[in-house]
Image (cartoon, rainbow, N blue to C red):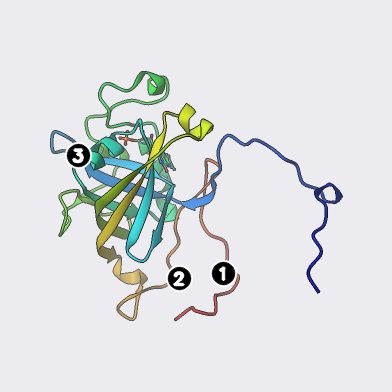
């Protein structure tokens, strides 16, 4: 006996055209190296990991993508919910000077994004880009491939983008979030969630998967 597929008109859904698809993603602050050697910092919410490979979604108009195309060193810093205001201080900034015309109404170029955000640069061990000291998770990484994303009208309208594939070289986790040497304590660690352009923490735990080791 096969499950019967019911007809859509029988249920209460709307077919809509949202301009963004940010269904609640963790935020990261990517640090990269500008052409003059200074560090750049930018929030992203399009990223995911498989093993120690991570994919970062970058719009083509970002200084971060320019930096990563030129110089593969970066750090994926993952902030906790209490850092949302620092992330929001970075939100209207770009490392592009001059600011691209399509961004100039809402964005500005600051001399130093660490200073603007009230964040502290911490030297990395394996890459040139600095870590963000206040972020409890800092993943040193190097770019391995850049996959161009094009042909989808809404992304093309934003100027296109890229899926930047990076390899994680070193994972630094704040000591109080570490459990038994190599585990991140899921009862303590919380990411900052970007949910349709609003910031959230996590709610209470609901359960765990059959493969949970702690
Ligand atoms: C919470 C948050 C999440 C963001 N996520 C992304 C993202 O996933 N990819 C992206 O290209 N831009 C994202 N942005 C926008 C960039 O941060 C913005 O374009 C910034 O100017 C890039 O800085 P840069 O030009 O110095 O690289 C996000 C912004 C915020 C505030």
- Helix, strand or loop at label 3? It is helix
View extreme (front): residue = 1
**Disc 1/disc 3 C-alpha distance (Å):** 41 Å
Is residue 114 in view from this perspective?
A: no
Q: Which mark is residue 70?
A: 3
3 or 41: which is nearer to us?
Answer: 3
Is residue 8 in view from this perspective?
A: yes
Q: Which mark is residue 118?
A: none
Q: Earlier in the sequence, mark 2 or mark 1?
A: 2
Give how far across and how far down residue 105 sits, in percent.
42, 19
**Disc 2/disc 3 C-alpha distance (Å):** 36 Å
Q: Which mark is residue 205?
A: 1
Mark count: 3
Locate the N terminus by quadrant: bottom right
Locate the C terminus by quadrant: bottom left
Give how far across and how far down residue 89 sits, in percent.
37, 37
**Disc 2/disc 1 C-alpha distance (Å):** 9 Å
106 or 143: which is nearer to us?
Answer: 143
- Helix, strand or loop at label 2? It is loop
Which dot, 2 or 3, sits closer to the camera? 3
Residue drawn at x 33%, y 41% as measured from the top left: 42
View extreme (right): residue = 10
For disc 2, the marked residue is 186
Give how far across and how far down residue 7 sits, in percent.
83, 52
Give how far across and how far down residue 126 sits, in percent.
15, 58
Contact flag, marks 2 and 1 (Cβ < 8 Å)? yes
């Amino acid at each position: 006996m096969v499950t019967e597929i019911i007809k859509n008109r029988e249920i209460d859904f709307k077919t809509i055209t949202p301009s963004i698809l940010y269904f609640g993603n963790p935020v990261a602050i990517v640090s990269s190296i500008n052409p003059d050697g200074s560090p750049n910092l930018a929030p992203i919410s399009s990223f995911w990991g498989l093993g120690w490979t991570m994919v970062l979604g970058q719009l083509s108009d970002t200084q971060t993508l320019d930096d990563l195309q030129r110089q593969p060193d970066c750090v994926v810093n993952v902030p906790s919910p209490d850092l949302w205001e620092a992330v929001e201080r970075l939100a209207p900034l770009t490392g592009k000077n001059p600011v691209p015309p399509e961004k100039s109404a809402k964005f500005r170029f600051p001399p130093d994004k660490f200073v603007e955000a009230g964040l502290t640069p911490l030297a990395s061990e394996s890459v040139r880009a600095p870590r963000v000291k206040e972020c409890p998770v800092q993943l040193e990484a190097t770019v391995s491939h850049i996959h161009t994303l094009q042909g989808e009208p809404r992304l093309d309208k934003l100027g296109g983008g890229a899926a930047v594939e990076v390899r994680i070289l070193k994972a630094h986790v704040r000591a109080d979030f570490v459990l038994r040497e190599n585990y991140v304590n899921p009862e303590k660690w919380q990411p900052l969630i970007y949910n349709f352009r609003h910031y959230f923490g996590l709610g209470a735990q609901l359960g765990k998967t059959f493969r949970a080791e702690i």
